[in-house]
């Protein structure tokens, strides 16, 4: 738990962005030998909770570190699993597969757990994905379902890195 060593925490992202970001300033006092803080580094998993300390609102991995001086604070930036999905690419050819089956397969391939994948029940006769990001493949599949259902869909990360696809109720 690094909560008490954080001077600032900012959680950002909205429905127009594919993923979420958490940025925080972490106490940096290398010359204070009495201060015992957990060491953190790029690649570490970070989970932020609601004030109750039980319900996670963000889980991601540290990608960036910014030192402003030798002492004071260090700014860390973490991104959720959707960021990883936008950076990883593959080529796949799907036939007679539903968007939810495609999403589950892509999550497994990306090494991520799938959460609630909205059940469209709409088989896609054929979908060739050439050098596309994991995120784009899932969204392309659900876009094809949109043509049949009229519903809009979005990806989110639930709890501890579970990728979900939901029907957008507000659009």
Image (cartoon, rainbow, N blue to C red):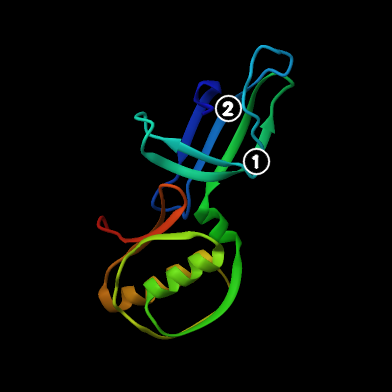
Above or below, comparing residue 117 to residue 78 in the picture: below
User: Is residue 159 left or right of 106 when viewed as pictured?
Assistant: left
Tell me how many marks there are: 2
Front residue of 51/128: it is 51
Above or below, comparing residue 73 to residue 24 in the picture: above
- What residue is rendered at 51% in x and 59% in y? 112
Above or below, comparing residue 144 to residue 158 in the picture: below
- Mark 2, Cα crowd under 10 Å, few <14 / some 14-19 / many 20+, is many
User: Is residue 146 left or right of 159 when viewed as pictured?
Assistant: left
Q: In the image, residue 21 lies at what x, y percent?
A: 51, 43
Q: In the image, residue 151 lies at what x, y percent?
A: 27, 68
What is the distance, in whole Å, between disc 2 and disc 1 at their CAs?
Answer: 12 Å
User: Is residue 70 left or right of 156 when viewed as pictured?
Assistant: right
Q: What residue would you read off at disc 1?
A: 64
**Between disc 2 and disc 1, whose residue precedes?**
2
- What residue is rendered at 46% in x and 41% in y? 12
Above or below, comparing residue 13 to residue 86 in the picture: above
Front residue of 17/158: it is 158
- Mark 1, Cα crowd under 10 Å, few <14 / some 14-19 / many 20+, is some
Q: In the image, residue 166 lies at what x, y percent?
A: 32, 60
The disc placed on residue 166 is none
Secondary structure under tag 1 reads strand
Residue 78 seen in render: yes
- What residue is rendered at 57% in x and 56% in y? 84
Q: In the image, residue 54 lies at what x, y percent?
A: 36, 35
Q: What residue would you read off at disc 2?
A: 25
User: Is residue 139 left or right of 120 when viewed as pictured?
Assistant: right
């Amino acid at each position: 738990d690094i909560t008490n060593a954080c001077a600032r925490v900012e959680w950002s992202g909205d429905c127009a962005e594919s993923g979420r970001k958490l940025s925080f300033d972490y106490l940096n006092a290398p010359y204070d030998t009495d201060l015992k803080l957990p060491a953190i580094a790029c690649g570490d998993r970070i989970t932020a909770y609601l004030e109750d300390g039980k319900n996670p609102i963000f889980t991601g991995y540290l990608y960036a570190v910014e030192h402003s001086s030798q002492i004071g604070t260090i700014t860390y930036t973490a991104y959720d699993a959707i960021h990883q999905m936008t950076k990883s690419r593959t080529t796949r050819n799907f036939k007679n597969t539903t968007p939810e089956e495609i999403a589950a397969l892509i999550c497994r391939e990306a090494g991520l757990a799938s959460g609630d994948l909205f059940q469209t029940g709409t088989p896609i006769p054929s979908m060739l994905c050439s050098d596309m990001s994991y995120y784009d493949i899932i969204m392309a599949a659900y876009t094809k379902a949109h043509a049949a259902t009229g519903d809009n869909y979005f990806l989110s990360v639930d709890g501890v890195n579970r990728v979900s696809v939901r029907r957008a109720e507000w659009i």
